[in-house]
Structure formats: structure tokens, C-alpha cells
Amino acid sequence: MKKALITGASSGIGSVFVRELAGQGYDVTCVARSEEKLQGLTKELGGSHRYIRADLTDANDLAAICQELSDSKYNLLVNNAGYGIYDHFGNIPLEKVHHLIRLNVSALVDLSHAFLKSASSGDALINVSSALSLLPYPGGAVYSATKAFVTNFTEALWYEYKDQGIYVMALLPGVTDTNFHHVAMAQRDYQAPSGPSYPPEVVVKEALAALQKRKSSTLISGPKYRFLTALATRLMSRAQMISMMGKGSAGL
Ligand SMILES: NC(=O)c1ccc[n+]([C@@H]2O[C@H](COP(=O)([O-])OP(=O)(O)OC[C@H]3O[C@@H](n4cnc5c(N)ncnc54)[C@H](OP(=O)(O)O)[C@@H]3O)[C@@H](O)[C@H]2O)c1
């Protein structure tokens, strides 16, 4: 039986990955901080699906998940745990900036390393980035920069591992209906994100279709976001594109 480990499995995109992969016959290990939600999810799925409670910004918890990836053979890792902070850069205390980078960047790099050390032909790594990784986001400057790191890092790994038959993919969702925006705007009055929004089921369905094909290095999920991103990155100057993102920003 194929085994998958999903981080950020307690809600949103991660929990849909869990359900879909379990439905495809994977034995799934769910990782996040919210033990009750993980317990409920694995109980509902039944079988040998399990969870490990871990705060991936905690060095000991992160080391334990890396150890799990080294000790037990997994065929798929979905590095999905992540969050954003939408505010003017100067309003965000530096320790919060560091916390964000620890989860979105450092933990993802450590887990990718642990997984790829024992990966073999047929295995796959999906790193969940964001369409904002291609579009600098004033009002979410650190968040979009962490995701720029994830996309760039993952695309390079796609090339490094493809000749070994190990598939690495950067998944770049556009706005998705999850708890993400409430967390990102926890310090501000909540503003619904502008632009089209997709249910997490659409994001995961497209990702799993790409996983079957094992070709693309990068998947922007949601047809409207594929179009809008192409428009903004190919037809506008950088200054025009950044100004457009700033004017529509939920963080300013
Ligand atoms: N929603 C969007 O519009 C959107 C767009 C582009 C990209 N994304 C990306 O998609 C991914 C999933 O987000 P989502 O939209 O599904 O939001 P979500 O519903 O808020 O899910 C975030 C997940 O990350 C987990 N998490 C947060 N901090 C953690 C920590 N310190 N240690 C371990 N797990 C942690 C959360 O679980 P616990 O709180 O239980 O730990 C939760 O399961 C993120 O990487 C996000 O950046 C989302």
C-alpha cells in the first residue's frame, strides 16, 4: 500500500488532500497542531490512517516528523502547512515575521530534505506554494516572498530529481475558500479577498490529476488564476503589476 504524509492536514486544502488520497487507496499520515481535528478526521476515515500532532515551527516537533520520514518509507509528501500575515510590513513584529518564515520556508526545506533522502523512483513531493509567489504582494510582502522561495526551490528540485523518476511539483493555488484569509487578517478587520475564489476540492483535484501525469514542474490551480497570472506576468511591466497588486491588497 502506498503511503502519504500530509502537513497542514487539519483543515482546508490539506484535509481535502487527506480525503482524496485515502479514497485513492493511500495510507495517510496527517500532521498539524489541532489534535482534535486530526483525531476526528482519521477516525472518520477509519483504516490504518493516523495522525501525528506537531507544531512545525517547534524544532523538536519538526525533527520528529523528519525522523518519521526517514524511518518509515513514504511514497508521497505534501508540504501544505502554511499561513500568511496581511498587513503593512512595518506593523508586523519581527518575531511574527520569523515565525512565518520558519513554517513556510525552513520547515518545508527540512521536510523536503528528509523525504528526498529516502525517495525512490515512483515517489512524489508536492510543495504547496501560491499564485502570489509569482506576484509580489504589497500588504503581504513576507508571505508572497516565502512562497516565491517555495516555487523557485521546488521547480529546481523538479529538474534535479526527474531523471531518478521522483516527481516534484510546485502547486500554486489562487484564492481558495479556506480559513487562510481569516488567519492572514487576524490583526485587521476581515476583508473578503478580491478576485475569483475556488473551493479546495478544485485545487486538490487539479493537483492529483497533475500527479498522475507527472510532467509539470508547476501548477497554478484554478483556470482564472492561470489566465490572470499569465496576463500580469507577461503583459504588464513589473511596476504596473506590483502597483495593481498593491491597489487591490487586503493587507493595506
Ligand atoms: N486559501 C488560499 O487562498 C491559499 C492560496 C494560495 C496558497 N495557499 C496555501 O495553501 C496551504 C494550505 O492553506 P489553506 O488555504 O488550506 O489554509 P488553512 O485552512 O488555514 O490550513 C492551514 C493548515 O496549516 C496548518 N498549520 C498552520 N500552522 C502550523 C504549524 N505551526 N505547524 C503545523 N501545521 C500548521 C493548520 O493546522 P493547525 O492550525 O491545526 O496546525 C492547517 O491545517 C498554505 O500553505 C497556504 O499558504 C492558500
Image (cartoon, rainbow, N blue to C red):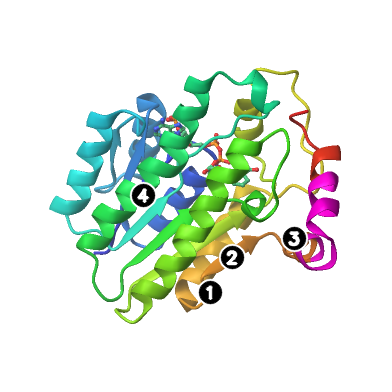
Q: Residue at x 31, y 31 (%)?
A: 54
- Disc 2 versus disc 3: nearer the observer: 3
Classify 10 Å Cα crowding around label 4: few (below 14), some (14-19), many (20 and above): some
Say if mark 4 contacts mark 2, CB within 8 Å. Answer: no
| Residue underneath mark 1 | 216
Examine the rendering and report whether any part of residue 48 can be seen: yes
Q: Position of residue 12 (x, y in %)?
A: 55, 40
The amino acid type found where label 2 is placed reads Leu
Q: Is mark 1 within 8 Å of ligand 1?
A: no
On residue 229, which mark appears?
Answer: 3
Chain-order first, disc 4 or disc 3 = 4
Q: Can residue 56 be found in the magenta stretch?
A: no
- Disc 3 versus disc 1: nearer the observer: 3
Q: Residue at x 65, y 54 (%)?
A: 131
Say if mark 2 contacts mark 1, CB within 8 Å. Answer: yes
- What is the C-alpha distance between the residues marked 4 and 2? 19 Å
- What is the C-alpha distance between the residues marked 3 and 1? 17 Å
Q: Position of residue 191 (x, y in %)?
A: 78, 27
On residue 97, which mark appears?
Answer: none
**Direction from residue 204 to residue 7 in the image, left or right:** left
Classify 10 Å Cα crowding around label 3: few (below 14), some (14-19), many (20 and above): some
Q: Residue at x 61, y 29 (%)?
A: 85
Chain-order first, disc 4 or disc 2 = 4
| Residue underneath mark 4 | 109
On residue 219, which mark appears?
Answer: 2
The amino acid type found where label 3 is placed reads Thr
